[in-house]
Image (cartoon, helix red, strand yellow):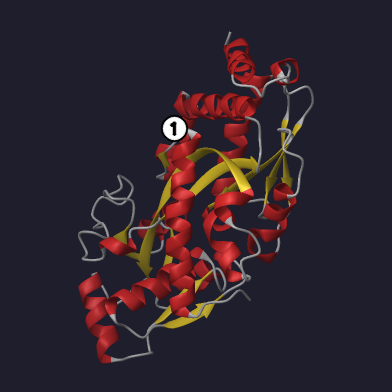
Amino acid sequence: MRRRSMLAAVAALGMPGAAHAQAVWPERPVTVVNPFAPGGFTDGFGRGILQHVQRALGQPFVLDYRPGAGATIGALSVMRAAPDGYTLLYSPTTAWVVSPWLRGAVYDPATAFTPIAEIAQTPMVLTARPGSAYRSVAALVEAARARPGTITYASAGAGSLPHLMGNFFAALAGLELNHVPYRGGAPAMNDLLAGHVDLMFEAIPNVAQHVVARGVVPLMISGGARSPLLPETPTMQEAGFPDLDLTSWIGIGGPAGLPAGIVAGLNAAVNAALAAEDTRATMARLGMAPLGGPPERMAARILRESALYRRIILQGGISAE
């Protein structure tokens, strides 16, 4: 019944003269490009979502990993693909609103893709190394102002979301912090745990496990509300930095010009996947929040955040490695 309803939506909203072609979409496997290497919570979560989608639509949805150039290699491959519903892009924030501005505006996020659905968002946590003297944001700001340039923050690399948030935080607070880029989030977190760097902005699934086990200190969290995983950690609004309230979010889209019927069928399948009990359980365990909703909501977010990250990048003089 679910597959028939999905296909009915596709047929009803198809392009004029193409109702039959869209009514049988998908007729073959669909390639879903992930512009990052395998691994990490977003990859595993995406596999679970796509399993629901392929059961609903009756064809395999196969992840194709195309990492490199800060997600632009994978994003450009989708942008240049035929808008027939057989090549899609599954990515966190980077490809949708960040990477183009780090590499000379290689594409316009607002026009390069057809948004299908926001999937989920993950709060970012400002975290201090184990044994840190900074037990609150106020204490950190006071120390950083007293000793400009001596406090370090790690990131997954130049232009990564942890880098952008660290740079933006420093600008908002009027601080001089020392950025230490790494080749990926795992080595950056390892050096934070070892005490080689002072701070790091990181997604909550990669932080919460270390709070009790390794003694890292969560100072503030984005997302608009306190997390059940870190209930004692104040929000960025509570800590006095509402403008820093940025999350890492995941979305799925296709090339520009994707037919409305295909978008409708995919959007319905993704929203159904987000409502599934196992999906909700996974998100709760990871500290993620479901999004979903119509494609227009994702389009509006791309416009809003693209302008914000472009401003952060330009004002911070940030470039890709």
Q: Residue at x 48, y 75 (%)?
A: 314
**Residue 317 image position (x, y, % from top left):** 50, 80
Find the residue positioned furthest to the right. 28
Q: Residue at x 38, y 57 (%)?
A: 246
Q: Residues within 10 Å of mark 1 (few under 14, many from 20)?
A: some
Lateral position of residue 22 relative to residue 99, left or right: right
Q: Is residue 193 visible?
A: no
Above or below 101: residue 32? above
**Residue 190 image position (x, y, % from top left):** 52, 69
Q: Quadrant of the N terminus?
A: top right
Mark count: 1
Q: Residue at x 26, y 87 (%)?
A: 145
Q: Which residue is mark 1?
A: 293
Lateral position of residue 316 relative to residue 156, left or right: left
Q: Quadrant of the C terminus?
A: bottom right
Q: Residue at x 77, y 29 (%)?
A: 29
Q: Nearer the viewer, residue 280 or 113?
A: 113
**Residue 308 image position (x, y, % from top left):** 42, 63
Q: Is residue 188 visible?
A: yes
Above or below 181: residue 203? above
Q: Quadrant of residue 239?
A: bottom left
Q: Quadrant of residue 126?
A: bottom left
Above or below 290: residue 232? below
Per the image, label 1 sits on a secondary structure element best described as loop
Q: Nearer the viewer, residue 78 or 203?
A: 78
Q: Quadrant of residue 48?
A: top right
Q: Nearer the viewer, residue 176 or 129?
A: 176
Q: Nearer the viewer, residue 139 or 169?
A: 169
